[in-house]
Image (cartoon, rainbow, N blue to C red):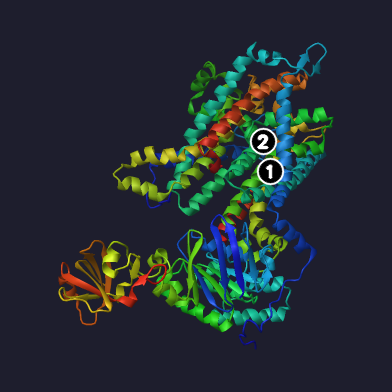
Amino acid sequence: MNVSRHFGDVKAVDRVHLDVPDGEFFTMLGPSGSGKTTCLRMVAGFDHPTAGKIELYGQDVTNLPPYERDVTTVFQDYALFPHMTVFDNVAYGLKIRKLPESQIQQQVGDMLELVRLPGMSKRKPSQLSGGQRQRVALARALVTHPRVLLLDEPLGALDLKLRQQMQIELKNIQQQVGITFIYVTHDQEEALTMSDHIAIFNLGKIEQVGTPAEVYEHPATEFVAGFVGVSNLVRSPLAESITGSPQTFSIRPEKIRLGEVGGSAPKNMHSATGIIREVVYLGINTRYIVDLDGGGELMVVEQNMETTSMDVVEARGRKVNLMWDKSHARFIGGQA
Amino acid sequence: MRSDSSRRAPLLLTLVVAAVIIFLYFPATVIAIYAFTIEDKLVTFPPPSLTLNWFPITAGRSDLWESFSYSLAIASISMVFATILGTLAAAAVNRLTFRGKDAIAFLLILPIALPGIVTGIALSSSMNVLGIDKNFWTIVAGHVTFCTVTVYNNVIARFRRMGNSQIEASMDLGASGFETFKNIILPGLATALLAGALLAFALSMDEIIVTKLLSGSETTLPVWIYSQLSNRPRNRPITNVVALFVLATTFIPVILAYRWSEQASSEE
Amino acid sequence: MTTPAHAKERETVRPPSSILRDISTFLYRRPWLIMTLLLAPPLLWLGVVYLGSLGALTLNSFYIYNSFSGQVTPGFTLNNYAKLFGGSNPTIVFRSAGMAATVTAICMALAFPVGYYMARYASPRLKRFLYLSVLLPLWSSYIVRIYAWKTILANEGVLNWFLNQVGLAGARDALLTAPVIGGNSLSVSIIGMLLVFVYVWLPYMILPIQASLERVPQSVLDASSDLGARPFTTFWKVTLPLAIPGVVAGSIFTFSLTLGDYIIPNTLGSTLFIGNIVERNLGANNNLPLAAAMTVVPMIVMITYLLLARKTGAFDAL
């Protein structure tokens, strides 16, 4: 156990209790204003909780200023010092610690290699690209060997391809270096890609904590089901007519099969009939929006194994019987 | 708005602008010419002939040098105090919420927005009440009051451009508040500080109204020039040289200040 | 040499502790203390000393002045303010206000084209050049600029020589005999004062206008023309209103500085303005109460003006 926050209570964060396991890539996920960044800042020491405490490896750090905590941060805007070179930026923390010059040279050099920026030491931040600045920020934060590294939506400013590349790199670096990473993002795909565990925030509270698979397959609340991955939420009375239980359930679009109308569904499956209203051809798969006869709609995603774009166009308006395995229906808040 | 130099400005507009700029510089040019003229009583135009004679004569006037150094001393010290006060105020406002910021900005601008006589008489009568004699320090006190705002404006603009994340990053990496100030804040503010200080210096060097109300027996250079205006022209040529000299000396700080405040924006 | 080791095996090096760090931590946990320390000196000086002096001045305006003995006694009388309504004082006040307003108006008219040109048409280099060209006169010596004009306007000076050459001497004389603005000669006349006032304060008006015009987002102008507005309409309905804060900011200076000035009136004429009266009463008579009363008038006017200007957002343009 390395970071525990009990009852962090600031206006933006409402009685959050979180234990972050050691050595993990831990993500705090949620929409803007959900309190995740505030939590991160409290761990870093920039915001003070109104009530509660923050413990780092057993030590109560709640009242310590940021410079007394063994925690460093990669900021959203990188916060590089513009009047210093890359080398001086990365070496900053080491110089504060009054380490010998030779050691500083060594460690900075190693770190720049780790983030794959060799030979950039003499440059100034204004001469670097966004991706390069991001790596410098990372190097700067890691070189002091913190016990926990905090990352505040560091990839937000990068374009898609670069972002995906950096996601993999960050994960690798974390595993290589072995430090606990606490990562904040609003991008659920990013969270699912990189994390060992995810905490989902909403309106200052934590909705669920779990592994990516757990959070995706077994959402604890409606919010989680809707936020992580695309999901279909079915509420009563429609839910009851399909499953026999009044509890709201969610079913992932890729788990639904489009079948012919007529005939009954196998015993282990739920079914519902409807008409295809919209079809979107996405190359790898096709997305269908189906208006259910019982009211409401469901999104269905099917891989285009045999379907061609021609078939897809003709699909609109077709009557279908949707079926899915009963075990794939996730009841919100526990099993029915 | 975006400047579009591909679009031609209307001719009339360009002429007006050119005229205004020439208008602004015309008097200085005239003075420059006059400083070299041989004529010593009147200001006939065109000047009969040119000479460098008046320069050494003016340089020989020790009373003028005294006034000049008096002005210099006042300006330098006022500059230092104004810089300290202005920076402190800017640092405070940087952390503040909306309401306090307005009030403080208002307070700071008051001495410079109110007519000089108001500031001058107010401070002067306070000093009378407190039984303080008018001297070097009373003038400094007056100057500091209205010079602070120039430093404040420059520094707070720089604070806004810097943003807080650099400061947070520094502390995050282990630097205490003081270390952060020395390593990050001060270098970041440096050129803005200097620019504001220089402007304060120029402002102080030039001031007359408040100075007259708060000074003792000594005079500053601008006050001396003023005295030459009210009397029948006795020392015209010398005054011309002095005028040219003053113009030249304010030239340099202003250009430097401009360079320095522009510098930071190119650094980012 | 160092292979990336597991977190637990690597030691975390702490920065060395020191007194300064402890003080820093002490302060960090008490942000209100930091604020107090930062604000105390400037607030003490400006708030207490300056505002206090202004208050004392206002108090003084109510004190009693004995013209025989030259004594000032604390007390309360509205005598001084009453004097403001008597004799030539009202004329002086109106004259000062009128001059201030005229100067402001002329400055606005001259400054706006320059600011507009700088923001709209000037290339970056030209813009910098123009900016510097306006900045220099603003900060260069006030008294020297007045002195320069005195010599230019003198009977034997440049302007008269030019007018004589061009044959406009008659026009000039006619102008000088005009009521209100006329005078003995160009260098001793109201029109001369007006000219010098405008000259001296013009940069104060140009820069804020230029600043606020710069801030007009191009996208707003594009949207306006996109919606079908002709260039003039865009200018009138979009650009101009957005430039108002800058104009107001500039006017604060031109109005205030003209209102209280006595140097230009002294140098270029014998007509009396508020500043002259104040100076007189202060000097020879030592009639501080009357001088104070006279000063309180522009003070109140300007403070009101400032408070109103704040509403228009002019402060951001400074």
Q: Is residue A88 above or below residue B260?
A: below
Question: Residue flagged by tag 1: what amino acid is it?
Answer: Thr
Q: Is residue A88 left or right of residue C214?
A: right
Quadrant in the picture for residue C180:
top right
Instruction: Work out how far the residue at label 1 is from the one at label 2, CA to CA, in angstroms.
Output: 9 Å
Question: Residue flagged by tag 2: what amino acid is it?
Answer: Pro
Task: Name the secondary structure under disc 1.
Answer: helix
Task: Name the secondary structure under disc 2.
Answer: helix
Q: Is residue C162 left or right of residue A259?
A: right
Q: Is residue C293 left or right of residue C194?
A: right
Which one is nearer the viewer's eye here, B115 or A272? Answer: A272
Q: Which mark is residue B148?
A: 1
Which one is nearer the viewer's eye here, B126 or A123? Answer: B126
Q: Which mark is residue B225?
A: none
* Horizontal and vertical percent position of residue B208: 71, 34
* Horizontal and vertical percent position of residue B252: 66, 49
* Horizontal and vertical percent position of residue C168: 49, 25
